[in-house]
Amino acid sequence: MKDLPVADPGEPDHRNATRYLIWLARTQAATLAGGVAFGIAWMAAPAFMPAVIGRAVDAIAAGDQGDLSEATAVLIGLGCLQAVAGIMRHRFAVTNWLSAAYRTVQVTVRHATRLGATLTQRVAAGEVVAIGTSDIGQLGNAMDVTARAAGAIFAIVVVTVLLLSVSLPLGLVVVVGVPVLMGIVAVLLRPLHRRSQEYRELTGDLTNRAGDIVAGLRVLRGVGGESVFAARYRERSQEVRAAGVNVARVDSVLKAAQILVPGLFVMLVTWLGARFALDGRISVGELVAFYGYATFLIMPLRNLTEAADRLIRGHVAARRVVRLLQLTPEVTDPEQPLPMPPDGDLHDPESGVHVRAGGVTAIAADNPADAQRIADRLGRYDPDSRVLLGGVPLSKLPVAAVRERILVADNDARLFNGPLHAELGGPRDRLPGALHAASAGDVITALPKGLDTPIVERGREFSGGQQQRLRLARALQADPPVLVLVEPTSAVDAHTEARIAARLAGHRRGRTTVICTTSPLLLDRADYVVHVVSGRAAAEGRHRELLERSPAYRATVGRQP
Amino acid sequence: MLPVADAPSVRRYARELLARYPGRLATALGLHALAAASGLAAPRLLGELVQGVHTGTTGWTVDRIAIAIAFFVVVQAVLVNLATYASARLGERVLAELREEFVERVLALPLSTVERAGSGDLITRSSRDVAALSNSVRYAVPEILIAAVTVVLTVAGLIAVAPLLALLSVVSLPVLVLGTRWYLRRAPAGYLRENAAYTDLMDGLAETVEGARTVEALRTAGRRQARTKVDLRRSYRTERYTLYLRTVWFPVADLAYLLPTVATLLAGGWMYLAGWVTLGQVTAGTLYVQQLVDPLDRFLSWLDELQVGGASLARILGVAHVPDDRVPVPEKPVGRQLAACGVRYSYVDGRDVLHGIDLVVRPGERLAVVGPSGAGKSTLGRLLAGVAPPRVGSVAVGGVPLVGLPLPELRGSVALVTQEHHVFAGTLRDNVSLARPDANAVQIRAALRAVDALRWVEALPQGLDTVVGSGGRQLSPAQAQQVALARLVLADPHTLVLDEATSLIDPRAARHLERSLAAVLHGRTVIAIAHRLFSAHDADRVAVVIDGHITELGSHDDLVAAGGAYADLWRSWQADLPRQGVQDGEEDHHGKGHAKGHDQWARVRGGLVSG
């Protein structure tokens, strides 16, 4: 069996959904072929069984022990073939399913990381997550079903040939009857799908509602409102129930049709067969075989309708994957990148903010959104950023090099699951220093396993202030030449804020640091403060100077009662 | 972790559940039995056909038998239709009851459990376990029941046609039982691991997508891809394990299904030659034995699903097993004075986070609680709100312990708002009127105005009827906190505990909000835990909590005048001149450096080496 996942998923063909499916199939052509081969063997064995059983019945009728033993021996052989081919077919099918699903996960994740900040701006996260929760399964199903589909087609052909060779009219009945049966089932499947879809949506909604209750349980248990929520949930639950009954109404018709249509077909074949047998045109055993064929054909038929359905769904899923893969990052590399300047001041012409290399510059904006915008320009997250680094426009530098040089750490940054020390990153011997500077040491010591404690649920078990300090520690651990911090202490208490303010500059010594903040504690520790009013640098100087000479600055940063 | 129900109570519950609708259950099962019985006609009629053709008969007899086959096919189809519908209706009803009961149990969880337990476990139970159970009730249970009925009836049909041949159908039973037992012992755990690995994979994907900007900023794309690969590898391992189980079990089952057919044919041949059975009997017997395969296979392959469903049911029922921690006492509070006396509390045995807190909050007073994080402020807030009982000591309102008050009464007296800002899926109106569903628009608006939220609410296209929360309009964390506060204003308890309830709001906006809130809450007792010292400055009294003790208590002015830790804190928070050492003295070095002016920063930096 293949070893999964593959080391390199390769570059997908994302021109359209069909091409993506073909690309996927190509990458796993060998296992698909294996699946098809065993699928054919697996379906062929039972296709020949009615003939063998018929021969056995004929042998019994003729009293021929030898023929009977031979027929049963063949039957055992076919049974063994079916069992072996069946499990091999299954193993290949599972491999095909997993190969397609895993490869799609790999290219999705890789593309998501290539898109970076662009991703969240351009598509709803739910859209991409849906690729994981449903689409990869559909793609897997489409690949997995090929083995059975091939077997089904083969079996139908075999049975038709066998029937035609025994009796032309009976064979024709089957040849014509099979597509008709498929058509009838397909017609019935459509309303079932529609109602099932509606049911799934309602169920999804209900699950979200339960999740909503659980997530807000503290609030609910704190101030009340349980009865309202219980009633609302019950209402929705009853809607789901009604939708479920609605599905059952169609489903029960389908189930009946699945008995009725093939049943009548079997009856027709048997009746004709009996008539022919009575006329001596076929033997008793052949009559039994006809009955066997007619009942057997139901299975490949079902497989074939399922295959068609799965391929259609796989195509829909591929469309969504392709939509993601077609996105390109908003911030792109210049065609002729300039060499990275060794060091230098940062200058944002749009706001007039100037950041000196090697020091701590604070940006105090009267509107916090302006500070965030400046930070986005300084880090070149804004595609229109005209920021200069040492006189060179950031837009003329490779994006990767800019990211390496400048780190923008804001409060929307998220903590990822995994051991804390891995999430904080950087060399472990420098961790204590970063944790100290971020005043996050106590967060770690309170944990049962310290730095080895896993972060779960994006760090929700930490308080807002603790999360903020961990994010700060992580940014410090990254140790970029230029660090842009956006409101790094907005959620911490006064003691902690004072500690961070006192330690931050020391920790960043010799490297460029920009802090967007209105905290007097942080501002007082900055080497240089730029007061931004309505998005433009209005005044600059040291915190204390600005406090003295600018009433507007006092209004922005003042904490006076 | 929340408890899980044990096997006997799960079985008892399942029995009770089935017994709730004896009539419907009997109808569904009866219809399925009749449908299965009519499915037995065809092989038998075919046997007659074969017998007739073999021994010679008329065309009319053949036609009659064919018509009979058609008749039974139609009857079976109608019965299957009715039976499927009846059992699905029953299934949906039972399922709805199960999930509704679960949600009611969740909503009745004790406050302390809710506060302490992470939501992860409960979310898993409400989504994955409910889904697994739903799968069981919708598919596994009916399939297994139908298959069982069909197997029994087919065997009965076989016995009726050819009792001797029927004996042969049991030849493969031991193999089948042993193989299936081997499989079922391992399968559920294997599939659970498989699902868990898959969930991890999906969580990882969701993280990468939602945190794409962070990944780009920290240049951790390689780590995300490596994590994906690790998740995929783990998922693959679990998939391979269950595949191995099936690789053993499927062929065993396949061969076990084949054996009876072969045995019936062989033995049938000999018996026919010996004159014990007719050709028709051999034919019908063989077809019956073949017809056993499908229901038998379905019966066995749904068993593992049923096991998974049973495990989910155990976790769902387990929620009801959390003991209640509130023991209502008959006394009624006299007055509204909130008093904590000798309060100690620990999350982990032997590690108290509060060391004997004594605090009397006067009715109508505004008390600010400040202190470094981890000092026990939030724990104190929870105890003062009656969420959990103290380990030692008491917290009482009007002389009655808070945990002795019945829940509705407690909520009318003391309410807690934390910085956790969940917005429920629904309209803004629903979100605000949570505790007072009967509140009218005027009251809701007044509450929103009190928290400075009315302006943005009215700017929304649908105003109060805007759908917010998951799936609706996303509120900013600051707006969510305003909604939480408005909710509390509307609930109007006489004492409010606000734990960092405005921490996510812009500092200047927060101050404005707090002042407007104070005006509305005039006369109410407010305990505000805050990291912004505005709250302390505006409060009547300030309690400084350090290391689980109240170290200072008094008005802002008194404490500033006293020159203790609070005074230091206040000055440092304002970054007032002259600077005072705040924590560990290292600040003093910086202080000197700063006075030198910005053009000196290079030298200051050099001076910081010592700090």
Image (spheres, helix red, strand yellow):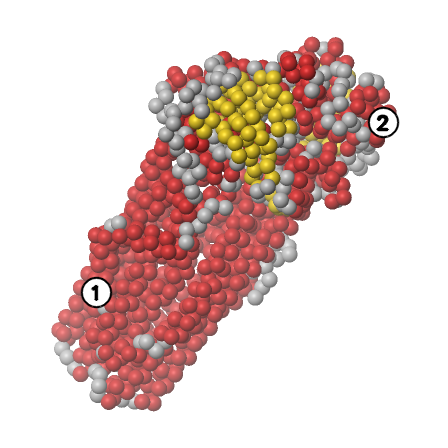
Q: Is tag 1's residue or tag 2's residue first in the polypeptide sequence?
A: 1
Residue A400, located in which quarter of the rendered image?
top right
Mark 2 is surrounded, within 10 Å at the Cα level, by few (under 14), some (14 to 19) or many (20 or more) other residues, namely some
Between B329 and A158, the residue placed more toward the observer is B329
Between A324 and A127, the residue placed more toward the observer is A127
User: On the image, numbered disc 1 is attached to which residue?
Assistant: B38
User: Residue sitting at 84 percent across and 31 percent down?
Assistant: B609
Q: Are marks 1 and 2 on the same chain?
A: yes
What SS does tag 1 mark?
A: helix
Q: Chain of mark 1?
A: B
User: Residue sitting at 76 percent across and 15 percent down?
Assistant: B578
Which mark is nearer the camera, 1 or 2? Answer: 2
The quadrant in which the C terminus of chain B is found is: top right
Q: Chain of mark 2?
A: B
Spot occupied by residue B340 in the image (x, y as percentages of width and height): 52, 26
Spot occupied by residue A29 in the image (x, y as percentages of width and height): 55, 62
Amino acid marked by disc 2: Gly
A310 up-or-down from A538: above or below:
below
Between B219 and A334, the residue placed more toward the observer is B219
B345 up-or-down from B264: above or below:
above
Does any portion of residue B311 appear in the rendered image? yes
User: Residue sitting at 39 percent across and 79 percent down?
Assistant: A76
Does any portion of residue A362 appear in the rendered image? no
Residue A482 in the figure: left or right of residue B69: right
User: On the image, numbered disc 2 is attached to which residue?
Assistant: B607
Residue A102, located in which quarter of the rendered image?
bottom right
Amino acid marked by disc 1: Ser
Spot occupied by residue A145 in the image (x, y as percentages of width and height): 45, 60
Mark 1 is surrounded, within 10 Å at the Cα level, by few (under 14), some (14 to 19) or many (20 or more) other residues, namely many
